[in-house]
Image (tube, rainbow, N blue to C red):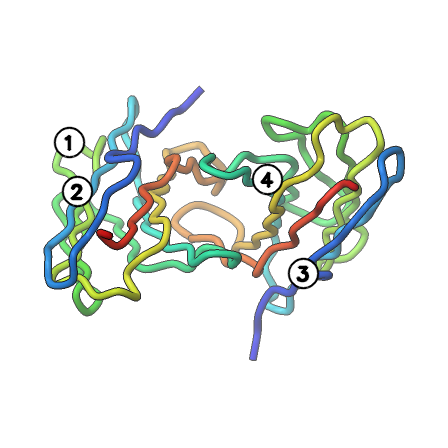
Amino acid sequence: GQQLNQSPQSMFIQEGEDVSMNCTSSSIFNTWLWYKQDPGEGPVLLIALYKAGELTSNGRLTAQFGITRKDSFLNISASIPSDVGIYFCAGQFRGSQGNLIFGKGTKLSVKP
Amino acid sequence: DGGITQSPKYLFRKEGQNVTLSCEQNLNHDAMYWYRQDPGQGLRLIYYSQIVNDFQKGDIAEGYSVSREKKESFPLTVTSAQKNPTAFYLCASSKAGEGYGYTFGSGTRLTVV
């Protein structure tokens, strides 16, 4: 079946640092989405991407739809403590009937 | 305001008992989904429904059952056949077709005691 590889699995951030994470798929996707999940809550949509090469920002967050349509990237600039949580990528391929494939998530924690 | 509501937030069940988790949406979405999330794990699809009175098994449907009698509602029953039911359960909904993201509920944490 379709799979998404999301990396890194986890990372520690220090306030002010920039953060990058990415997802790669074995198939071409038509839509890429990025979600954030706070502890004990449901994921919330951050950014949606619909075209190869598309670069979209939402405040300090920037996501890109890869040119090959098999990958996507999320960057967080100047991280703050409330950025901690789990970030999920998700994608749709043609013929998926709207069903999303999810990555396993990247957990952001604050450096001790 | 439109949204998707899961209840209860916390649920305790004795071993051998069935329990039903509620999911209601007023977003007029056609499709609804149930996911299970374990610590350190991603989201695993249990069941989904793209239209009233129809639903399909996801990757981990064994020990679970659903119904979709109304567009707004997609309850999940965790049966006694589910061997490891303690988990965080998430319901989601979306418009029909491709190009739409999911709206998630705030989840139900089920603990078997």
Residue at (72, 25) in percent of width and height = B62
Mark 2, Cα crowd under 10 Å, few <14 / some 14-19 / many 20+, is some
Q: Are marks 2 and 1 in contact (CB under 8 Å)?
A: yes
Q: Are marks 3 and 2 on the same chain?
A: no
Seen in the image, is A17 located left or right of residue B88?
left
Q: Nearer the viewer, mark 4 or mark 3?
A: 3
Q: Nearer the viewer, mark 3 or mark 2?
A: 3
- What is the C-alpha distance between the residues marked 1 and 4? 31 Å
Label 1: which secondary element: loop
Report the front residue among B94 and B63.
B63
Q: Are marks 3 and 2 in contact (CB under 8 Å)?
A: no
Seen in the image, is A37 located left or right of residue A62?
right
Label 4 amino acid? Arg
- What is the C-alpha distance between the residues marked 4 and 2? 31 Å
Q: Are marks 3 and 1 on the same chain?
A: no
Label 2 marks a residue whose chain is A
Query: Residue A52: which disc?
Result: 2
Mark 4, Cα crowd under 10 Å, few <14 / some 14-19 / many 20+, is many
Residue at (67, 33) in percent of width and height = B56
Mark 3, Cα crowd under 10 Å, few <14 / some 14-19 / many 20+, is some
Residue beneath disc 1: A68
Residue at (56, 80) in percent of width and height = B1
Label 3 amino acid? Lys
Residue beneath disc 4: B36
Label 2 amino acid? Ala
Query: Residue B9: which disc?
Result: 3
